[in-house]
Image: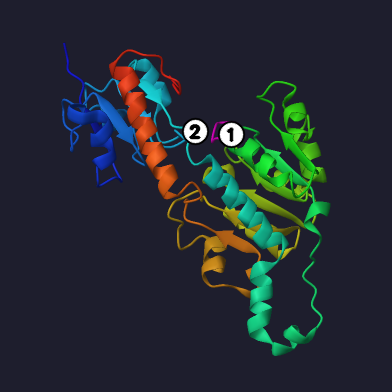
Amino acid sequence: MISNKIAVTDHIKDFSIEKKFLGDLFEDKLNSKTTILLVWHKIINKEFLQNYPLVKAIIRYGVGFDNIDIEYCKKKNIIVANTPDYGIDEVADSALAMILYLTRKIGSLELLAKEDPNYWLGKEFNLKMKRLNKLSLGIIGLGRIGGSIAKKFLPISKNIGFYDPYIPNGYEKVFGIKRYNTLEALLKETDILSINTPLTAKTRNMVNKDFLSKMKKGSYLINLSRGPIVENQKLILEYLISNHLEGYATDVWAEEPPSINDELYLSWLNNEEKLKGRIIVNPHTAYFSEEALYESRSKACLTCLDIVNNRFINNRIV
């Protein structure tokens, strides 16, 4: 009988949490006897797994699992599980903070305060500001995070809608918000759009020219899901310059870290006039707090123990 040996593939340097929960099952380094992988960003594919022939399970510390070759794991009967129920408040709070920053023009007003002292004395400006409770929030994906965003936004405004063909009827009644049966209808009527979906074959490149053209003119786009959901970052730049998009906030990028040749990223880095106060870029950290990081790692370890002890695996993907 092969004994269970658990190791971390990447990113984490201090293994104190893993050792606390896993004890002698945990090893500091991957080796040919490793049977369970704890994964952060590492690409787990055929080439990687061939070096670790005893691996029987892969646990993602985070929510997304697009860095794991699911089909190959199925073929090899390797269990894959994720940790989807950590950092929910953090991501939802980040979305809300981004919405408030963009719609209340916090960055733009800060620039005005630096630019001309007469703004302190009532100098006129036009920043297309509207009362937040008059703006509609649209959510694509009413899962844990999308649902949390809706819940947190409700005290501000009841004008919330969502599109999610994967959840059963009735969730709109639970939240007291409007359900849209088509994505096009949601885009047409939404002032602030928050994307909160996993990266799948259907959501990859979802934000394309057709998608953006159907969004309400002067609307805001918030992406705290996955970078490749946006087909082309240059399109976001074009729609910001044309003012079809009033603002854009993201915690993710198609390529992370972003390429210095990416026009949108370069425009943001250079603090170009046309984007000042209208774009927010965070380095894929919306999930982060000390509490969330501990929750992610401890829950991933508990999933390992469920596998070792042949118990039900709550967040099993395959």
Residue 228 horizontal/vertical position (percent):
53, 44
For badge 1, the amino acid type reads Arg
Viewer-closest of 144 and 139: 144
* Residue 9 in magenta stretch: no
Q: On the rendered image, what quadrant is the N terminus found in?
A: top left
The quadrant of the rendering that contains the C terminus is top left
Q: Which residues are magenta?
A: 198-203
> Which residue corresponds to mark 1?
144
- Element class at badge 1: helix
Q: Is residue 23 left or right of 315 when viewed as pictured?
A: left
Vertical relation: 202 (above or below) 290: above
Residue at the disc numbered 2: 85
The answer to whether the residues at label 2 and label 1 have Cβ atoms under 8 Å apart is yes
Identify which amino acid the numbered label 2 is placed on.
Answer: Asp
Tell me which corner region of the image, top left, top right, bottom left or bottom right, holds residue 66.
top left
Number of callouts: 2
Asked whether the viewer can see residue 225, the reply is no
Residue under the point 33% across and 36% down:
39
What residue appears at the point 28 percent right and 18 percent down from the top-left corner? 308
Name the foreground residue: 169 vs 258: 169
